[in-house]
């Protein structure tokens, strides 16, 4: 039985596609993402990716990046604080509080974890504890961060006057990016 030319071309093309060629050559100028396994040396730090995604408002993707960082680096204070901050942005206050408390257990001097824990407690309506947490963050930071000072001021105002209403535009998170460098994320 003779194959028509079209069938012969299809079969030949299929067999050529199944042939092992040693992988695809990646063109650095190509707009398409490379496929295959990524070497650990070639990958970007999950914390850096997560921080960038948080800044872009992509909180679910940031969580995935932070969880990848946790798998690669272990539960460091940076990773725990980042996961807690991301949970805060996603509205998962219980999970955020748990992660931030774990970060503080790992390093009691880590200012971003204290500040973000205060933000979580304010969201939960636990103003008394939040003001104490902000005081700790403020003391550890030596009063250098205006955002922590503002968080403390608002918590104390709310503590003194429970009827105090915060403006809708106020919402700060402090995320650590490396050695002593802080990235302040604010959402209007």
Image: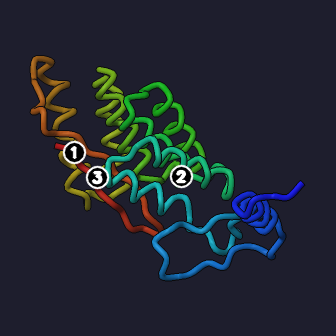
Give me the C-alpha separation between circle 1 and circle 3: 7 Å
**Residue 84 in the image, given as x and y percentages of width and height:** 47, 40
Q: Secondary structure at mark 3?
A: strand
Residue receiving disc 2 = 65
Residue receiving disc 1 = 187
Query: Against 98, is 56 above or below?
Result: below
Quadrant of the frame with the N terminus: bottom right
In the current view of this chain or complex, which residue is farthest to the front?
1
Does residue 2 appear to the left or right of 174 in the view shown? right
Give the colour scheme shown. rainbow
In the current view of this chain or complex, which residue is farthest to the bottom?
28
Q: Secondary structure at mark 2?
A: helix
**Residue 184 in the image, given as x and y percentages of width and height:** 29, 56
Residue receiving disc 3 = 185
Q: Which mark is residue 103?
A: none
Does residue 124 appear to the left or right of 30 in the view shown? left
Quadrant of the frame with the C terminus: top left
């Amino acid at each position: 039985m003779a194959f028509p030319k079209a069938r012969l071309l299809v079969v030949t093309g299929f067999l050529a596609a199944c042939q092992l060629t040693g992988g695809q050559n990646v063109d650095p100028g190509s707009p398409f993402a490379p496929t295959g396994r990524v070497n650990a040396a070639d990958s970007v730090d999950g914390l850096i990716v997560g921080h960038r995604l948080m800044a872009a408002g992509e909180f679910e993707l940031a969580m995935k990046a932070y969880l990848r960082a946790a798998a690669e680096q272990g539960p460091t204070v940076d990773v725990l604080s980042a996961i807690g901050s991301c949970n805060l942005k996603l509205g998962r206050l219980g999970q955020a509080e748990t992660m931030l408390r774990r970060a503080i257990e790992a390093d009691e001097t880590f200012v971003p974890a204290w500040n973000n824990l205060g933000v979580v407690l304010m969201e939960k309506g636990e103003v008394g504890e939040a003001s104490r947490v902000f005081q700790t963050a403020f003391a550890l930071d030596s009063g250098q961060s205006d955002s922590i000072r503002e968080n403390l001021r608002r918590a104390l105002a709310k503590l003194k006057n429970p009827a105090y209403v915060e403006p809708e535009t106020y919402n700060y998170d402090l995320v650590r990016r490396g050695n002593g460098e802080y990235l302040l994320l604010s959402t209007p």
